[in-house]
């Protein structure tokens, strides 16, 4: 079992229809058919949504996503219409709400990897390839790839992991032309993100984009982009291939959860305990740090 210890009860807002509770986000629809994505302060680790929230996480990741949408706009239009919560929304939705165009979502998790880790590393260790793309021998955890690789995945059911699939499987699913567009656009967006992040001393190991098509059939960048929830960001100064790299935002939580202090046994498949205040505060500080380091600006709220 994994996922929620207690499934949250979504906030009901007059005029909005609640559509979906994700691990860390809520999705609503307006009466006029637009979507409202609300980022919560929930955080997940080891496939569990933790019982303790990280203050301002939703606002930090929403602000970062908006910052990236602006810097990717010449490569792909975005689904974002507004960052103003709809009328009647709770006051604390300010700064963590995106009103978006409803798209015909492409059922493919468009992942780009510039470094080898996670499920890509596991697949490589089994067969020397990821998503059917052969890689050089001798790569280690955290190795930088000579060229970024498109490693798509199918969207998993709640509580399951996305499954890496080959480009050929994506072509069979959505057609060769669209598959080619997804690969080209995913790698271009990743390349822009990696370049901007590296200028700021941050390595973008990998990231996941989601696309939809608008009424005109155009590919539109959807979901969130280049946040710590959709990407792996590593501080460049800590990069050392051959071992797991410290995750910018979740390492503190992971280290505490797997320490004797937590009393939690990950293998026992029992819900994780609440986080100590000190772990919460240090994790919040990491979200602030990654926001400020990437954007070069102080967080846009008190
Ligand atoms: N983005 C977007 C989007 C769009 N622009 N048009 C149509 N559908 C979606 C859409 C559907 N599911 N999700 C994932 C998701 C996001 C946020 C919260 C959640 F709970 C779940 C995204």
Image (cartoon, grey):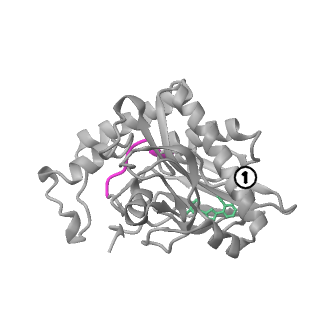
Question: Camera-side residue: 189 or 227?
Answer: 189
Q: Is residue 59 left or right of residue 121?
A: right
Which image quadrant is residue 283 in? Answer: top left
Say if residue 282 shows up in the picture: yes
Give the image location of residue 93, x and y in percent. Answer: 56, 48
Vertical side of 100 occupied by 228: above or below: above
Give the image location of residue 118, x and y in percent. Answer: 40, 56
Task: Give the structural element (helix, strand or loop) at label 1.
Answer: loop
Q: Is residue 54 left or right of residue 276?
A: right
Per the image, the residue denoted by label 1 is: 79
Q: Which residues are magenta?
A: 51-58
Give the image location of residue 147, x and y in percent. Answer: 57, 45
Residue at (45%, 62%) from the top-left corner? Answer: 23
Q: How many marks?
A: 1
Q: Quadrant of ligand 1?
A: bottom right
Residue at (41%, 38%) from the top-left corner? Answer: 234
């Amino acid at each position: 079992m994994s996922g929620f210890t207690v499934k949250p009860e979504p906030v009901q807002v007059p005029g909005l229809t609640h559509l979906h509770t994700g691990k860390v986000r809520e999705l609503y629809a307006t009466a006029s058919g637009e979507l409202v994505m609300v980022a919560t302060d929930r955080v997940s680790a080891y496939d569990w949504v933790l019982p303790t929230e990280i203050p301002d996480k939703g606002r930090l990741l929403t602000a970062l996503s908006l910052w990236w949408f602006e810097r990717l706009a010449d490569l792909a239009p975005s689904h974002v219409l507004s960052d103003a919560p709809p009328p009647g929304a709770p006051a604390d939705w300010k700064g963590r709400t995106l009103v978006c165009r409803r798209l015909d979502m492409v059922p493919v998790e468009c992942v780009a990897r510039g470094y080898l880790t996670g499920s890509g590393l596991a697949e490589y260790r089994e067969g020397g390839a990821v998503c059917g793309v052969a890689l050089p021998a001798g790569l280690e955890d955290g190795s930088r790839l000579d060229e970024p690789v498109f490693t798509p995945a199918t969207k998993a059911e709640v509580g399951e992991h996305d499954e890496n699939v080959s480009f050929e499987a994506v072509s069979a699913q959505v057609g060769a032309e669209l598959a080619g567009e997804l690969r080209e656009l995913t790698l271009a967006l990743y390349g822009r993100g990696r370049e901007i992040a590296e200028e700021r001393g941050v390595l973008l190991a990998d990231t996941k984009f989601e696309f939809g098509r608008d009424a005109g059939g155009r590919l539109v960048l959807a979901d969130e982009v280049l946040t710590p929830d959709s990407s792996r960001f590593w501080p460049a100064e800590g990069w050392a291939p051959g071992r797991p790299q410290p995750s910018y935002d979740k390492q503190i939580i992971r280290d505490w959860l797997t320490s004797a202090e937590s009393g939690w046994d990950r293998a026992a498949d029992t819900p994780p305990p609440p986080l100590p205040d000190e772990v919460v505060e240090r994790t919040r500080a990491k979200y602030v740090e990654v926001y400020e380091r990437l954007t070069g600006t102080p967080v846009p709220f008190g």
